[in-house]
Image (cartoon, rainbow, N blue to C red):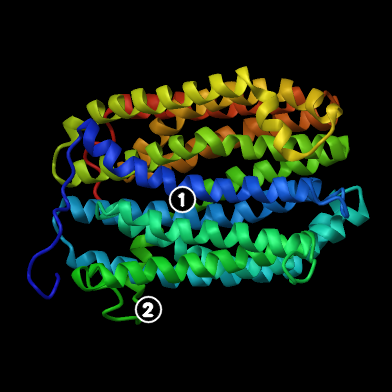
């Protein structure tokens, strides 16, 4: 409880207004990092001193996303628990959960750093055909990975602020992170304004500095708004095995789920490397394209898991199907609109990456395939996150694992065995999202989730 004996209203409704109130700040918080990825790619595409920088950026970007995804899984599990306690009107539990989440995040980041310095060089040397690209990727990652502790602690503020219905404060930290990243990308990649020209490595240092500034800013906001006092954040910083175990029971399946999802994407990019630098460049740009509608889609997905958990905590499980239907309408409408724009004017966006006509010819057909996948994602991920919000994270993991197996088999056969053009490789996204949707829809329809206690 807060020291004043009052606290924020933590119970959510299932109205369109409530959905927007949560989803818009979340989407903005997701959009800005996606803009950072996009700007990184644009800057590296224009860095003529290293023509391979943008191609290597595809491999390193997805590798870092693996660890970011583990943090995202921890964030989602903690967010589900916080939202459930909010629905139960138990604010005194929220600070305890959050503090233990920080401990877990720090431990995971140390593990990520160790793996990047030990196992990753061996893996890349064996899989990548180009020794030069492999060395460049490893050198970059052994700088970039030091941002993991900052990233994990920064990510967990999502779980707190979204779980307690204070998502609007996400915007401030995100803006600071974005501005820092753009500034240091510009000066450290190209050596502008008297800064050293670090090229590809400059992008790594820029991202770490941005994560540090974003972290400092958002925790200053949490302190200034009295959120830390209201929910007893860091009242004790001692590691608590009971709370940590409870968080991991919910979060571990989600961490494995998100990690294997991005690992499969890393596998995809490693196989794409066998098709040459042009295929890597196109695929790196397509990864960035996913971030455009993905901002709203992932925001609606996070809103779904939070609101489902909160409603169940209030004892209102019967309202969950109405909530899911409303979020589906909003997510699909937004994504279809964005995809129409991308398909009508593809050259306008692709021209930002500073590539030649051959790149445009190769990229546009792949963009058509990717936009179909975006539309599938817009509703499939809502169903999957509704399962997460119910607390049945083991079920979510099983659904994801099944989809990943089919995805990897398809990618290997099409990309490496039959060596078909990457247009067909990207159709793997159609299989992936459909494989997530069918079992998620069936599980929600079964009603088995209604009495899950967490």
Q: Relative to 246, is 365 above or below?
A: above
- In the rendered image, residue 103, in percent from the top left (x then y), is placed at 43, 73
SS for dot 2: loop
User: Is the C-beta separation of discs 1 and 2 under 8 Å?
Assistant: no
- In the rendered image, residue 150, in percent from the top left (x then y), is placed at 52, 69
Residue matched to label 2:
239
The label on residue 253 is 1
**First-in-chain label (1 vs 2):** 2
Is residue 248 left or right of 92 when viewed as pictured? right
Residue at (60, 24) in percent of width and height? 342
The label on residue 42 is none
* Image quarter of residue 308: top left
Q: For the residues marked 1 and 2, what is the alpha-carbon distance in whole angstroms? A: 21 Å
Q: Relative to 212, is 179 above or below?
A: above
Question: Farthest residue toward the front?
Answer: 193
Residue at (59, 60) in percent of width and height? 181
């Amino acid at each position: 409880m807060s020291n004043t004996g009052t606290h924020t209203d933590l119970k959510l409704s299932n109205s369109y207004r409530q959905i927007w109130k949560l989803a818009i700040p979340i989407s903005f918080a997701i959009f800005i990092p996606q803009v950072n990825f996009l700007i990184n790619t644009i800057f590296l595409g224009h860095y003529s001193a290293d023509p391979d920088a943008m191609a290597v950026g595809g491999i390193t970007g997805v590798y870092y996303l693996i660890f970011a995804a583990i943090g995202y899984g921890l964030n989602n599990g903690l967010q589900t628990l916080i939202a459930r306690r909010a629905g139960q009107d138990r604010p005194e539990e929220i600070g305890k959960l959050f503090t233990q989440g920080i401990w877990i995040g720090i431990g995971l980041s140390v593990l990520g750093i160790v793996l990047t310095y030990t196992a990753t060089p061996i893996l890349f040397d064996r899989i990548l055909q180009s020794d030069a690209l492999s060395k460049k990727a490893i050198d970059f990652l052994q700088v970039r990975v030091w941002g993991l502790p900052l990233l994990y602690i920064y990510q967990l503020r999502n779980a707190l602020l979204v779980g307690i219905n204070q998502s609007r404060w996400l915007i401030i930290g995100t803006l600071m992170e974005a501005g820092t990243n753009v500034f240091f990308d510009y000066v450290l990649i190209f050596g502008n304004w008297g800064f050293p020209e670090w090229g590809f490595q400059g992008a790594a240092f820029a991202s770490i500095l941005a994560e540090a500034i974003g972290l400092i800013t958002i925790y200053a906001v949490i302190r200034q708004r009295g959120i830390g006092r209201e929910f007893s954040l860091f009242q004790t910083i001692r590691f608590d095995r009971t709370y940590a175990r409870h968080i991991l029971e919910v979060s571990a399946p989600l961490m494995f789920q998100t990690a294997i999802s991005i690992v499969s994407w890393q596998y995809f990019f490693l196989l794409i490397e066998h098709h040459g630098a042009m295929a890597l460049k196109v695929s790196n740009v397509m990864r960035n394209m996913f971030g455009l509608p993905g901002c709203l889609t992932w925001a609606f997905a996070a809103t779904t898991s939070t609101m489902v958990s909160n409603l169940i905590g209030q004892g209102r499980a019967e309202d969950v199907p109405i909530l899911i239907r409303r979020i589906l309408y909003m997510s699909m409408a937004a994504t279809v609109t964005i995809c129409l724009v991308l398909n009508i004017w593809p050259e306008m966006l692709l021209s930002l990456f500073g590539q030649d006509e051959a790149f445009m010819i190769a990229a546009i057909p792949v963009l058509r395939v990717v936009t179909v996948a975006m539309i599938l994602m817009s509703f499939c991920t809502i169903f999957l996150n509704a399962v997460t919000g119910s607390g049945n994270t083991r079920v979510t993991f099983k659904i994801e694992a099944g989809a990943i197996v089919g995805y990897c088999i398809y990618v290997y056969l099409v990309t490496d065995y039959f060596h078909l053009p990457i247009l067909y490789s990207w159709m793997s996204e159609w299989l992936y999202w459909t494989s997530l949707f069918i079992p998620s829809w069936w599980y929600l329809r079964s009603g088995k989730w209604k009495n899950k206690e967490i």
